[in-house]
Structure formats: structure tokens, C-alpha cells
Image: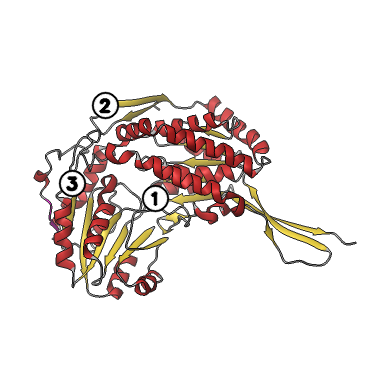
Amino acid sequence: MASTLRTITPVNGSLYVERDFANEQQIAAALSAARDAQVAWRNTPISERAAICTRAVDAFVAAKDDIAGEISWQMGRPIAYAAGEVGGFEERARHMIKIAAGALADIAIEEKQGFTRYIRREALGVVFIIAPWNFPYLTAINAIMPAIMAGNSVILKHSAQTPLCAERIDDAFKAAGLPDGVFQYLHLSHSDTERVIKADEVNFVAFTGSVPGGQMVEEAAAGRFIGVGLELGGKDPGYVRPDANLEHAIDTLVDGAFFNSGQSCCGIERIYAHADIYDAFVEGAVELVKKYQLGDPLDPATTIGPMVRTGAAEYVRGQIRDAVAAGGQALIDPSLFPAHKEESPYLAPQVMIDVDHSMEVMMEESFGPVVGIMKVSSDAEAIAMMNDSPYGLTASVFTMDADAAAAIGDQVNTGTWFMNRCDYLDPALAWTGIKNSGRGCTLSALGYDHMTRPKSFHLKTAL
């Protein structure tokens, strides 16, 4: 088994980061430190926790330019957009800090003579967070901030593709004066990740990643009776009704499909356009996609960078080939993108029509720069198509009729329902999914429910 973590950058295939994996003694020490530190941290007033966490956010944001460059090198996002992740990190972190006191307050029960009764939200203990590479800071902070603000300690295991992200977060908490042991990171092999999940010291696991990865987490935690939060991706649909603002729908859905080279769990992967506007939508989408600039993510002119690795790009190429062989049409000529290169992570964006649900490109997560567009004749058909999926993370409708949007949303099986937008997390709303998109919840006041346990106090005061 390899003893070192090696991050190969998709920019040029070179070695960008190399770190030693944590050894058995380091893992044991981290678990022990997290358990011990949490005892004092849970008794720290929320106002003091908030002050420390706010200073950590300040320190993180101050390093924005360096962090943006590291994101581009580690996973290939264009530098023109990389700093935006720092902004998203800040928005989510500050929101969860702001609402913590209210979200963690005791739940009062109606008065009963001779008794005092309330429900307290008690910290779980040690939270083990496993974060992915595609939005390496946004996915991590979703769980880190509510966990720490709730009085837990955290051990973060970040993706081997983005190890510097764990180190940057650690730097920020250290600069803020967070007590030792409350936040730690470990660079771990897959087998040691499973061992940590099984460790007696761990009281909750928050995982963001693939469906097989989520299955591994559930299997490793089986029989321990601890909570497990799983955010496992999606095959997110968008529906364009005939009354939609077509220009807005095209701009928003194309961006939702191709931002981050399509490597977003809540990115748009399939579109259903009403027959009345189908031709115009397809034409507009194709013209917009042709304006993308595929290339070196360190070039400010680049608008779509490489995928994270060649294997990921090959998977998407395979979906496209299979769909074409089954009768689908690929509308974008890759030769329009000089940086496109077979057997490389540089993959031209692709729009497909004449696709259907017998094709993998419309049913299985692509996680790349391809989107299929199907024609539908009614809201009912669109609803059926959107629900015909093993995933259920987000879905969206483009319409000028808010009542219709709400009525359709009530019938779509999804964790988040959008009208006239997509591919976005509002930290005031619960981030959750159904079916193969996982279970649990982060963000919003409800996110704190998953980082705490209810403890009932029943005090008889009159004897």
C-alpha cells in the first residue's frame, strides 16, 4: 500500500502535491485529542464559539488569492471562477454562525404546574467529515461550521485530489485561536478512512461523494448506531415551460450544466423543453455553448477547464459515444475547441438531442460537460421524466407562473426545487436529497439538528 498521497494536477499532468498518509499512531492521537478537546469545547459559550469561528472565516478570506490558485492547480477550475468558492465558503460559514444561537437554543415546552420541562440540543461528540474535490471548500464547510458551532470537535479527511484545502482550513482555525483538538485533518488511505469510521471515538460521519462511497460509509458504520449524513450527487433536471423567459432559461441552464466542467453534484445534467419552445431553446443553447473557451485554467480567458482526470473525461466520452450509437445527436463539433484532446482531461462541452431514458447519458450521473435535451408536451410528461431517475438532489422549472412552479414542485421527487434558477445552495435552506442522492441535512437551522442530539429535561419542582 502506498505510504504517500500524490496529487496529479489536471492542468498538465504533473505532480502538484505530495504528503505522507497519517500513520496508526497519528490517527490514534488525533482521535484521542478530538475526544478530549470536545469536552471543554461543548461547554464553551456559543458567543465565544462564534467569535472564534468568525475570526477563522476572516483569516480564510484574507488568503483568497492564494487559495484560488491552489484550487485551479488541484482540480482544474478556471482561475476566473476559482475565487468564487472563497465567497461561497464565507457566505455559508457566516450564515451558520449567525443562526447558531437560535438554532441551538433549548426547546421550551408549555408550562405544567410543578414541573420545568425543556429539550436541549446536545453536541454529538467527534464528527468525522469526508469531503470531495469538486467544490472542496463549499462541501466541507457545509458540515464543518455547524459541527463546530454546535460544540462538536471535527476531524476532516479531504480528497487526495485537494489535500491543500484541509490544510488551509486548519490554518484559518489556528489563526483564530481555536483550542487544540477541536479541528484537525488527516490525510488518509481508503482503508484507514474506514478504520476511523469504525473508531469508538467517532460519533457522527458526514460524507459527500459517490454512491459507492456512501455505501462504504454505511457499511463501515453498520452496527455502531451513530448518525451518518450522505450527500451522494445527482442527475439534476431542468424543465422549460412554454411561458419561460427563454433567454434567461438558456443562460441559466447552460451555466448550470457546464460550470466547473459539469463536475457538480447539483449541476444540470438533463433538460426537458416544452415542444412549443424546444427548437428555439436548443438553438440558443448550442450557440451559447459554442462561445465557451476550453483551455488552461490558469489563463483568465478560459471559461471551461479540464476535468479532474483523464479517466473521468473518458467516462463522459463513453456516455456520448453510446448515446450516438443508440440514435442520439451530438450538436457540438469538438474541433471548435482547439484544446480538446482525446485521452486527456480536456473535453469539449457537448449538447445532445434525440436522447431518451434508455441511454446512460440521461440516467446515470455524468459529472462532466455534457447535457441531454428532450422534448415534452406537457407539465405532466415533464414531471414523469424528472421523477424517472434514481437520484433526487435538485430540480428546476423555468416559468413566469409561480403558482404552477409550486404545484409542479410538489410532485417532483427532489431535495431542493428551484424556479428560474439552478445549481445553487442557499445556506438558509436545508441541503438534502432523496433516493440515491443520499440522506441527512446540512445548512439552515435544520442542519444543526443533525449535528446534535435531543436531550429531554423533566424537572419536578413541587413536592
Residue bearing the label numbered 3: 292
Rendered location of residue 161, percent (x, y): 35, 34
Secondary structure, mark 2, is: loop
Residue bearing the label numbered 2: 14
Q: Is residue 203 in sight in this rendering? A: no
301, 312: nearer the viewer: 301
For the residue marked with disc 1, what is the amino acid?
Answer: Val
Magenta residue span: 328-332
Q: Quadrant of the C terminus?
A: bottom right
314 is higher (above) or lower (below) than 177: below
For the residue marked with disc 3, what is the amino acid?
Answer: Tyr
Rendered location of residue 9, percent (x, y): 29, 31
Q: Residue furthest right?
A: 463
Residue 327 in which image quadrant: bottom left
Rendered location of residue 329, percent (x, y): 13, 58
455 is higher (above) or lower (below) than 298: below
First in residue order: circle 3 vs circle 1: 1
| Distance in Å between CA atoms under marks 2 and 3 | 25 Å
Q: Marks 1 and 2: in contact by CB < 8 Å? A: no
Residue bearing the label numbered 1: 211
For the residue marked with disc 2, what is the amino acid?
Answer: Ser
Q: In this rendering, would 214 be left or right of 380?
A: right
Secondary structure, mark 1, is: helix
Q: How many marks?
A: 3
Task: Confirm whether the magenta stretch covers residue 234.
Answer: no
Mark 2, mark 1: which one is toward the viewer? Answer: 2
444, 352: nearer the viewer: 444
Q: Residue at x 54, y 32 (%)?
A: 176
